[in-house]
Amino acid sequence: MKSLLPILILLLSMAPVLAQEEQKETRPMHKNEVKFQLTDVINGRYTVGYERAVGRHIGVALSVGNKTKDGLLKISGLDSEFFKTNDLTYSGFRIVPEVKYYLNEHTQGMLSGFYFGAYITYVNLKSEFKGIYMNEDGDFPFHYDVNIRTNSLGFMVGYKLPVSKRFYIDFMIAGPGAGNYRFEFKEIVAAPDEFWIDLNDELELISIFDLINADFEFSSSNTSDSLILPSFRYGITLGYSF
C-alpha cells in the first residue's frame, strides 16, 4: 500500500494538466476571421479582410483596401529643366486574394504560428499630373488625369501570434512578387508634342526605375504604356476569430 501512495500522488498532481490538455484538444475551432491592417493607415489606406480555415493547416483569405489621398508617404513632384509639378497624390482600391499554409496544426482555436503562401493583387489608382512644361518655345501648363492598374503575383512569409482566445496579431514579414503596371494619361490641358519625348527621358531618370529597363514610349498618339515591375508586401494586421 505504501508503494502505491507515491503513484497515487503523482496521478492526482497530473490530473489538472490532463484536464487542460483535453480541454485544449476539444476547444472549438474558430474557422472564420476578420481583420484590419494597421500599417496601411500610415499611407492613407484602409484595408479589411476575411480569412477562412479550410483545414488544420490551410487558410484562404480576401482583403479589400481603399486608398485615400492622405498619408505620410508622399511622392515628390518633378523639378527639372523641363518640368515643374506639385507632389503626386493618388487614390483608389486594392483587392488581394491569398492562400496560406500554417506549419502548426489547427488545434489552438485558430490558425496560428509561422506560415507561407501566395497572393494575387489587383490595384486601380487614379492621380493628377499637372504643372508647367518648359522648353525653348516657352512655358506650357499641362494637366492630365492618370490611371494606374496593376496585376501582380507573389509569395509571402509571416507569423500569426494569438494574444487571446479570439484576437491575434499577424506579422507579414516579407511578400516579394512581380506585376504588370499599366499607366494611362487622359488629357485635360494638352501639352506640345515635345512634352512626351522629354517626359519619357525624365521618367528613365527616376530612382524607382533604376534597376529595370524603364523604356517608356508615351506620345501624343499613344498615351498609355505598361511595365513589368517588382512588388513587395509587408504589414501588421489585427484580427478576430469566430
Image (tube, helix red, strand yellow):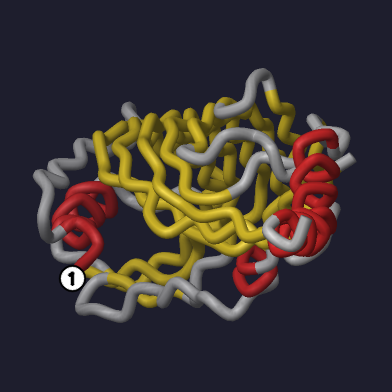
Residue nearest the viewer, comparing 238 with 129:
238
Q: Is residue 114 left or right of residue 106?
A: left
Query: 10 Å neighbourhood of mark 1: few (<14), some, or many (≥20)?
Result: few
Secondary structure beneath label 1: loop
Residue nearest the viewer, comparing 221 with 181:
181
Task: From the top left corner, tell me how far across and down residue 199 is, in percent.
Answer: 25, 55
Identified at 68% across, 32% down, the residue is 62
Identified at 59% across, 80% down, the residue is 72
Determine if residue 68 is in view: no
Task: From the top left corner, tell me how far across and down residue 150 is, in percent.
Answer: 45, 35
Q: What residue did someone put label 1 on?
A: 136
Q: Report the number of numbered marks.
A: 1
Pick the quarter of the image with the N terminus: bottom right
Residue 108 sits in which quadrant?
top right
Q: Is residue 140 left or right of residue 52?
A: left
Q: Is residue 145 left or right of residue 64?
A: left
Residue nearest the viewer, comparing 35 with 220:
35
Identified at 25% across, 35% down, the residue is 228
Determine if residue 61 is in view: yes
Identified at 59% across, 54% down, the residue is 160
Task: From the top left corner, tell me how far across and down residue 82 is, in percent.
Answer: 24, 71
